Image: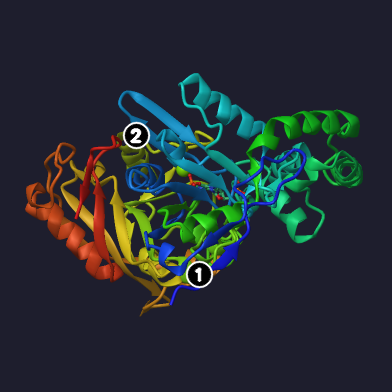
Amino acid sequence: MTRPFVVCGPGTGLLFKAGPASRVYTREMEAKMAVRILVGAAWGDEGKGKIVDFLSEQADIVVRFQGGANAGHTVQIGEQEYILHLIPVGILRPDKTCVIGNGTVIDPEALMEEIEMLGSHGIDVEGRLFISHNAHLIMPYHKLIDRVGEEQRQEEERIGTTGRGIGPAYADKAARKGIRIVDLHDHGVLKEKLQRNIEEANRILDAIYQAEAFDADRIIEEYLAFARQIGPYVINTSEYLNDAIDDGKEILFEGSQGTLLDVDHGTYPYVTSSNTTTGAACMGAGVGPTRIDEVIGVAKAYTTRVGNGPFPTEFPSRWGDEFRRMAGEFGATTGRPRRCGWFDAMVVRYAVMVNGIDSLALARLDTLDSLQTLRLCVGYRLNGDVIPHLPNDANVLARCEPVYEEMEGWDRPTGHIRTWSELPVKARAYIERVAELVKTDVKIISVGSHRDATIFL
Ligand code: IMO
Ligand code: MG
């Protein structure tokens, strides 16, 4: 029997663009297209940008649901390299719509810079970029507190943050004093909240960090200008996305950072300040878990980490420096050298578990082309015993010694290969062993930064 039901369109406000009006649906209209979540399976920089770009060809809407401009998602299209920090990678395809969900923290300055950067390449975001009215704003004092906080810690206690104000902004959100996109809509509220927060930030900056005070009036002026610029993009993205799912649209959630940087499931305190795992996609976009069809994890064929914290399979420094140069492993957001190491099946298997990963995309296989011997971490030794699971307590993980299995390298270029059968036998053996160790199918293999340098199984 066909039962009609009503779904309301996004809320509207003075500054905010009107969404579609209320519509009547029939259950038959809920034709199922896939809703997929893509997450990083290690410490970030797994090559998510390239894989999201590849998968977004089929998607209608690409959604960021957590983090902020700490992310650096790199996509190579022809000769042009794009690095996106805040706007979903789907924006690079002209027929896609992109959403920045409520779980993110938005630095309006970074957002406007990114919109401008895209504009300079002829990519127009108007009408296909939507921002949640419930997302929190990063303020100039968040960025300063993030930076001076790091500077004033002892070297060994530093997290190695990106300095983008992420931690302090999420702290304000949890403390219920954050300023949200919706507050830009009411100048009175914005002024009142800003004044209160700036006074407090100035007291902290002066007393603890002896840093210069912020001028409240200047920030208010700046943010009122941002309000006018951002206004046209703001809607109720949760309603928009749920409507789209009802309409049978194909949706791709673009995770940023990685599982081991999750504030709950990562190597705390050496983590970012948001949940980066799949549950966060529901929370950070206002979409229920029953609407998700598939979870894809992305891991590199080896491992990297930027910032501090335990990293059991990290290469010894001289070899690490050489590998980093060969692999070009430098941060897309901060330019910092990335720490490099062997593939760690303990880490990725853990990511498979906490995210419910259905299949894996293995990135940068070609980077291993010239190595004679490869190592895979298959377990950890702790206090003399081999342990079956990854301990996510940073202090315990720091004491774990990797147990390696060695495999012969394929010692041939793979960058030109586009099918599984063309891959060298030893490369296939390596991928099959990875899949076996992490108990998940590998469905996508990336052999280069270009869109077409992808093997889809
Ligand atoms: P994508 O999306 C790699 C790391 C920082 C630091 C820690 C906390 O490109 O994979 P934060 O500024 O978030 O408070 O820093 O998290 N980090 C990342 N590492 N890739 C990222 O994003 C990262 N975003 C944050 O280096 O160790
Ligand atoms: Mg990155």
Distance from mark 2 CB to nearest ligand 2 atom below 8 Å: no
Residue in the foreground of this view, choosing between 195 and 24: 24
Residue in the foreground of this view, choosing between 317 and 85: 85
Q: Which mark is residue 301?
A: none
Q: Residue at x 60, y 45 (%)?
A: 68
> Is residue 260 at all visible to an observer of this figure?
yes
Which residue carries the number 1 mark?
Answer: 289
Up-down: is 368 above or below 265? above
> Is residue 399 at all visible to an observer of this figure?
no
Q: Residue at x 75, y 40 (%)?
A: 139
The colour scheme used to paint the residues is: rainbow
Which residue carries the number 2 mark?
Answer: 325
Q: Position of residue 152 (x, y in %)?
A: 73, 44
Up-down: is 58 above or below 280? above
Q: Residue at x 50, y 51 (%)?
A: 257
Q: Secondary structure at mark 1?
A: helix
Q: Position of residue 74 (x, y in %)?
A: 42, 37
| Amino acid type of the residue that numbered disc 2 sits on in the rendered structure | Arg
Q: Secondary structure at mark 2?
A: helix
Q: Residue at x 92, y 44 (%)?
A: 192
Q: Position of residue 329 (x, y in %)?
A: 39, 38
Residue in the foreground of this view, choosing between 315 and 196: 196
| Amino acid type of the residue that numbered disc 1 sits on in the rendered structure | Pro
Judge from the rendering whether residue 156 lies leftward or rightward of residue 26; answer left or right.
right
Q: Nearer the viewer, mark 2 or mark 1?
A: 1
Q: Which image quadrant for residue 439?
A: bottom left
